[in-house]
Image: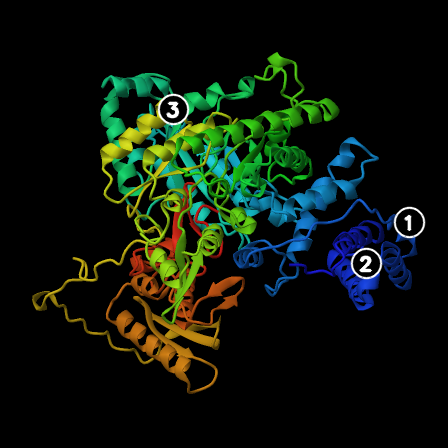
Amino acid sequence: MGVFFDSKEVVLWKNRVIDALIQDAALERDFAKQVADDIELEIKNLGESAANPQKLSQTIETKLMELGYNFMIPKIVFKKSLVLEKLELTENALVVLKKRYLKKDESGNVVETPEEMFWRVARTIAEADKYYDSNADLDEVAAKFYNMMVKLEFLPNSPTLMNAGRELGQLSACFVLPVGDSMESIFEAIKYTALIHKSGGGTGFSFSRIRPKNDVVRSTKGVSSGPVSFMQVFDAATETIKQGGTRRGANMGILRVDHPDIMEFITAKQDKKKLNNFNISIGITEKFMEAVKNNKHYDLLNPRTKRIIQGLNAKTVFDKIVEMSWMNGEPGIVFLDRLNRDNPTPLLGEIESTNPCGEQPLLPFESCNLGSINLSKFVKNKEIDFESLRETVRTAIHFLDNVIDVNKYPLPQIEEMTKKNRKIGLGVMGFADMLILLGVPYNSEDSLAIAEQVMSFLHKEGRIMSQEIGGIRGEFPSFKGSIHDTNCKKMRNATVTTIAPTGTISMIAGCSSGIEPLFAVSFIKNVLDNTELIETNIHFLKIARREKFYSEELIKKIARTGSIHGIADIPEKWLKVFVTAHDITPEWHIRMQAAFQKYTDNAVSKTVNFPKDATAEDIAKVYLLAYSLECKGVTVYRDGSREEQVLNIHKVNKESGAEKSSSSSKINLTPRPRPEAIQGATRRMTTGCGNLYITINRDKTGPFEVFTSMGKAGGCATSQAEAIGRLISLSLRAGVDPDHIIKQLAGVRCPAPAWENGEMVLSCADAISKALHKFLKEHEGGNGNNPSQKKAENSNYLNALPVSTDGYRPCPTCGSPLVFEEGCFNCKACGYSKCS
């Protein structure tokens, strides 16, 4: 889809003009863009004749002369070799880009095209070349980066797409911060966390250095509250910080299995209202795993004194980890000794933690810049095109190394440590698509062989390119004494490969996520007025039509469960190839993770999916298998084990125990009387039916009543909003917790959603829930001791969303199903992620 004039060069010329106006004429970017827009309009008016290189150059130079920018003319030199590729995006990709990536003005209007975004990123990252070569052709480098991205062969992590070339300029996705055993260190880490979350990054911590609960605190003659209590402070700080509406803070919390508070940590998320901004993992040691296998006790160590204070039976602890993972998918496990076995710079310290999704082990104050290659673009005639893949790997390594230099780091300590080791993480996405194009089932020995072949190739070529860059620019500063020092090769980067989550960038690329199997062949994207909008895998559609077994009835049948398993109308060959995450046994998930881990410097982000009826013993087997296959960590998810239910679960029984009632259990509630005078506030909310004015009044107990006005009397929307307000008022006056009201109304969707300050308002009911939620945050009410209001103020809006009758929890942005993969809940419709 070409947003610009047919001549591909116009994209390059327009952005070169903008860059030159900013650099040489010191114009603001918005004004420079306006000048470039005027030039583009004039080129369009010329028609096809402007596609002639001389005419194009002449038009640009003439227009600039008219505007008084004669000094720029020598810089506008046409280069025949710099032809930019055409960008083609899916409808979903455009939705995600407009919502989360493209530049917006103060009113929330998108003021950037996808092509302009990719050029902004390409030109900014190319700038690093001039640091090493003053004669570097930045346009040529930028065009190479641009083409790689617009062909959707490679995309960097989200912060790079969002922030490169913009004021924030923070390009890293993941960070690890140290947490020491002092109040100063702990709250300094919280301050640093706030700065990183504000910049759009996620943070990982090890809380293993904090002394255990009830341990002595000499300075105050008191006792310690332990690491879990301090994690709650980090969690509350994260809840408060908003990241400009594009990304929200996510944390990883790790505690060593030999910490005295390990049992409290394992069960820390048993209360589902706590630590909602954390993923938690147990730092497993080799000694512990040996004790598990032999059913023996192991030692717990006080991190303050380094003394053994007690022992626990390893099998008992392991079983508790398994039990909690069976219940809600957490904690995960991280094999700490393996992370440090592969620590490339052991002289700089020990690796204690990872980033939020576990794929990037990092030293304290270290960050990493990630990007992924779309493997679906490298299948030609049912064979892998390794020559094209090699070129993309080389360009991607060049790109990621440049990111380190142009990045604006949130802390000087992070800049120092990142540039000292220059870690990058090149990974993949679209692996499931590649297998489909090759006609290979995901759960097969052939697929494991392909995984090893592709990842070993990427790893080898990535290291070769890193060595070539190191030969020109110099090896990473901490090279001496690193694991690379023995081979005398000037590695530019301490690490090269990582398999990272690709939730939203895989949506932009139009491919499957990371190395995950398909989450569904077909699914109901959302439901509007009982109209089903069905999203179907493009490869399946092509094959079904080509082999003449396509029908609308078939697609609807598949969408009910997401899987084609057992459907007689589909040929056996394709039943095997189009398997989904829930069609595959957990053992195949782990074996695939291990195949990729074998050739990955860092770690692998992947979710091991279990059916709802899986037992704790099933999860224990997978943990032991992951250990024996040399994985570096494991994330599991049992279908239905959390409130946020995965896509396409069958209709729940509406007569479940929670909804059954009898006449003997009825409770009569009497609304409290209305006082003569009452205080409140009115909030304007934008809806698809027009501006909705919502007045919320309160008494000393809390919210008391809700009135609504649609701006003009009459009409269906006005009457329904009024009815909702009356029922809310009746409920509030009868003592119903406002949280329960928010939960019922949040996510209700109508055919005409609207945008309010960058946030989607799904309906009038959703607008009222948002207004009530904001009211509770702004007013503690009466004497300030209302527990329901304080609970609402600290609650995560996602947790207020109701579970639908299909059994899944809807996305808080668009109402579509949330899917659990790559260690996090993601929305396939709009790109929302609970982890970022």
Write down the quadrant of residue 212 in the picture. top left
Quick one: quadrant of the N terminus?
Answer: bottom right
Q: Pointer 3: what residue?
A: 629
Mark 1 residue type = Pro
User: Tag 3: residue type?
Assistant: Leu
Among the 4 quarters of the image, the one containing residue 813: bottom left
Q: Amino acid at mark 2?
A: Ala
Kindly give the residue lying farthest to the bottom in the view shown.
714
- Give the residue displayed 30% in from the left and 59% down from the top: 806
**Between 3 and 287, the one nearer to me in the picture:** 3
* Circle nearer the N terminus (3, 2): 2
Residue 354, above or below 95: above
Tell me the SS state at disc 2. Answer: helix
Tell which tag, 3 or 2, sits nearer the viewer: 2
- The kind of secondary structure element at disc 1 is helix
Q: Nearer the viewer, residue 277 or 129?
A: 129
Q: Disc number at residue 51?
A: 2
Pointer 1 residue: 74
**Left-right relation of 1 to 789:** right
Q: Earlier in the sequence, mark 2 or mark 1?
A: 2
Instruction: Please state the horizontal and vertical placement of residue 509, each as a whole percent of the image.
Output: 56, 48
The spot of residue 468 in percent (x, y) is 70, 25
> Foreground residue, 703 or 340?
340
